[in-house]
Amino acid sequence: MAGLLINVLILFPVFQTICLGFRSPLSIFKRYKDTARSLPSGCLASNRPVISPRLSDFALDIRMPGVTPKQSDTYLCMSVPLPVDDEAYVVDFKPYASMDTVHHMLLFGCSEPSSTENYWDCDEGTCKDKSNILYAWARNAASTRLPKDVGFRVGGETGAKFFVLQVHYGDIGAFRDKHKDCSGVTLHLTHQKQPLIAGMYLMMSVNTVIPPGEKVVNADIACRYKRFPMHLFAYRVHTHRLGKVVSGYRVRNGQWTLIGRQSPQLPQAFYPVGHPVDVSYDDILAARCVFSGEGRTTETHIGGTANDEMCNFYVMYYMEAKHAVSYMTCTQNANPEVFRTIPQEANIPVPVTSDMLKMAHGHHEETKDTGKSSLLQQAKNEGEEILDQDFHIEEAVEWPGLDLKLGQVSGLALDPENNLVVFHRGDHVWDENSFDSNFVYQQRGLGPIEQNTILVLNPSNAKLLRSLGKSLFYLPHGLSIDKNGNYWVTDVALHQVFKLGPDDKEPLLILGVALQPGSDKNHFCQPTDVAVDPITGSIYVSDGYCNSRILQFSSNGLYLMQWGEGTTSGRGRPGQFLIPHSLTLIPDFRQLCVADRENGRIQCFRLETGEFIKEIKHKSFGRELFAVSYVPGGFLFAVNGMPYPGEVEPVQGFVMNFSTGEIIDSFIPLRKNFQMPHDVVASEDKTVFIGDVHARAVWKFGSTEKSEPTVEARSQLESKPESTDPLKKQEKQHLVHQNSTGVSFLLVTALLIIPVIVLMAILMYIQWRKTTVSGADGEHKLDSSSRRILGRLRGKASSGLNLGNFFASHKGYSRKGFDRLSTEGSDQEKDEDDGSDSEEECSAPPLPPAPSSS
């Protein structure tokens, strides 16, 4: 028996390692760890996988191994093997780079890299065989996370076995101190099989010529799609300095559907597609890049040098796994006639500040004191996808706004100085006696409100800075402020819209006829809100309680168009309203979003045409949604109404991701309670103000950091609305922590005990066999068993797809630039080397049959 115990003690570590290795991905990485490159001490990351507590997931750092480029426009490549043999899926890309040092990065997947060195000059190529673009980054773009159940397939029998990172170092002035660079990207991978496979579709102009001095030049690309259906979820644009705006569309039966549009001078992230876009067999995919040749004295061609341009529109898509194609390209304009009907927005530049342009083009010496943080903040202000969602909204309990002596608070806004502006009703009240059945105001005998109805407050301490609006209004409602600081207000009793200067006592512009409700282009009926386009000056009015429409006027008040119709069901179709109550503009996406109050939803429309784009509706809104406000950076803020009898959704505020419609956070006051929150406005630092009609108060809320929820917490949040009681939140977090600790303890205990039990059973069997047969035979069986277990961890290699160097062979391309990066050129390259003529796309699998008419 003593011999048995000694055997147990000796062999236990061996069998524990084998058993744990069989159950955990840790053992899979042994081969990879032996070959992983070490980085200099100045680099914070290593090219090694990081195993998450969930055994199916892991992270992989792909970083330059401490390089110092010697000259500008250096392209360096390095490779990292996939640390597992079996199939895995990339679901998240997190970049680590600064535009101060890196012009752009590309990440490829391939079967074999072009070099086995730690890093190499990309003139040698990226992959020996076929390659797929998985990710691209430039200009301080943010992380890109794929939708749920979607991943780039790698490893296994058909997926890429290596990742190749390509980094373009533009201006090397930042390397004067000879520091070593470790820029790169961290991948989040999972072994959980993804039902939808991600891929990349690249649209790229190859023959555009921009004449010198030409103000507007369009580069158009269009290809007819001949594959199985794909669903688009993200896009990215790329040009050099002359690019003004890049837009991509799906064209089906002559109808143009926007995929995305963005300024190529902003952070070149993968921005989420604003609304779902599917592409089917025989659709057309079209893209337009708008350039200006002003300031140039010679023709500008497509190429990779500083004197060249590029026109790229990337689309990330997903397809069903059985039909998935990982990479597709379109490099021609197969049907120039189709662009005769392209939407006007494709030629409207996206506004970019001069400071952002300087930073984007490498003028670091002019802004070096501002640091990276200011640039990232600017990127958040301008780029819709770049969302910092690690915050929670809570009431600012020190705010004295609840003690202000106000009438019914109907409207709120922030002026250009970020002061809070309040629109209230003084001693007038809207009640059941205010209007007759024809919506004619019945209390005209009271006269206009004698108090100042527009109050400008210090947003920090609620101190009154100035006031106006005395003896002008009967029943104030909506308020907005244009970029010049003018106040735009609506009065539901007067049925009018007013424009007032910040210091004017008389209106600068009046729309509608006083005290006369109507539904033609000259009359309103209880208009609720107004919004002004900062680019065109167009005026948009939501009209209102007794009309269900949106009207557009020119900047000087001329009627242009209207859209919308009424519904009585509470379940209106797109473009139908049951009290369009609040408006907010999204200038960068050229959209107008409407709080459709009694339908309990947000509807968004294209500014130029009134075309419906998307609806945002959640069960937690309840039946009513009163107000909505947009903040640059991609956030929507909203407030709902009191629940109907028998309903449970509380009255509260919401924070949403504009692009996806997802609710990021919800909030309620800590003091008092909401009674009828009527309007909401938020600043870029996520300070939120809510005006309450019945409470006659203005609440202030601020953002605080929050921790990332655990897996258990996420599932609870997805299954039901988050509790808004702070004490309940603390209890929930405590329980989640206890549960996760318990699970971890049980898991570790099981992993330790099970191998011991199995081992003891095996050894007892061996000891018994020794009494009947040779012991050597038993040892031989044990050895072969362990070899079989370890053998299961081995896999096979295969290949992917490739762009090759066909770009370099097109006329007008600088060969050197495209040998290095295939799709992305330099803003500062000095060389220029023309290639030969060629017209071809990369090969494709056989086409599916055309769908039947049924």
Image (cartoon, rainbow, N blue to C red):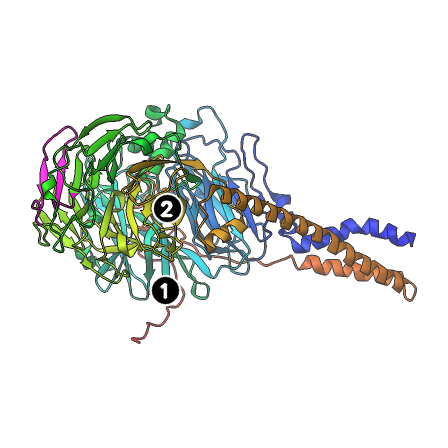
Q: Give the side of residue 732 with respect to residue 381, left or right.
A: right
Q: Is residue 112 above or below residue 557?
A: below
Badge number at residue 776: none
Badge number at residue 229: 1
Whether residue 732 is visible: yes
The nearer-to-camera label among 1 and 2 is 2
Residue for badge 2: 652
Q: Give the side of residue 52 with respect to residue 195, left or right.
A: right
| Quadrant that contains the C terminus | bottom left
| Residue displayed at 43% across by 65% down | 323
Highlighted magenta segment, given as a residue range: 491-516
Mark 2: secondary structure: loop
User: Residue 196's spot in the image, x, y percent?
Assistant: 45, 60
User: Residue 372's spot in the image, x, y percent?
Assistant: 40, 30
Corner quadrant of residue 646: bottom left
The Cα–Cα distance between marks 1 and 2, rounded to whole angstroms, is 40 Å
Are there few (<14), some (14-19), or many (20+) residues within 10 Å of tag 1? some
Are there few (<14), some (14-19), or many (20+) residues within 10 Å of tag 2? many
| Quadrant that contains the N terminus | bottom right
Whether residue 812 is visible: no
Give the amino acid at mark 1.
Pro
Which one is in front, 414 or 271? 414
Which one is in front, 453 or 736? 453
Q: Give the side of residue 786 with respect to residue 79, left or right.
A: right
User: Residue 134's spot in the image, x, y percent?
Assistant: 44, 50
User: Is mark 1 in CB contact (under 8 Å) with mark 2?
Assistant: no
Q: Is residue 731 above or below residue 614?
A: above
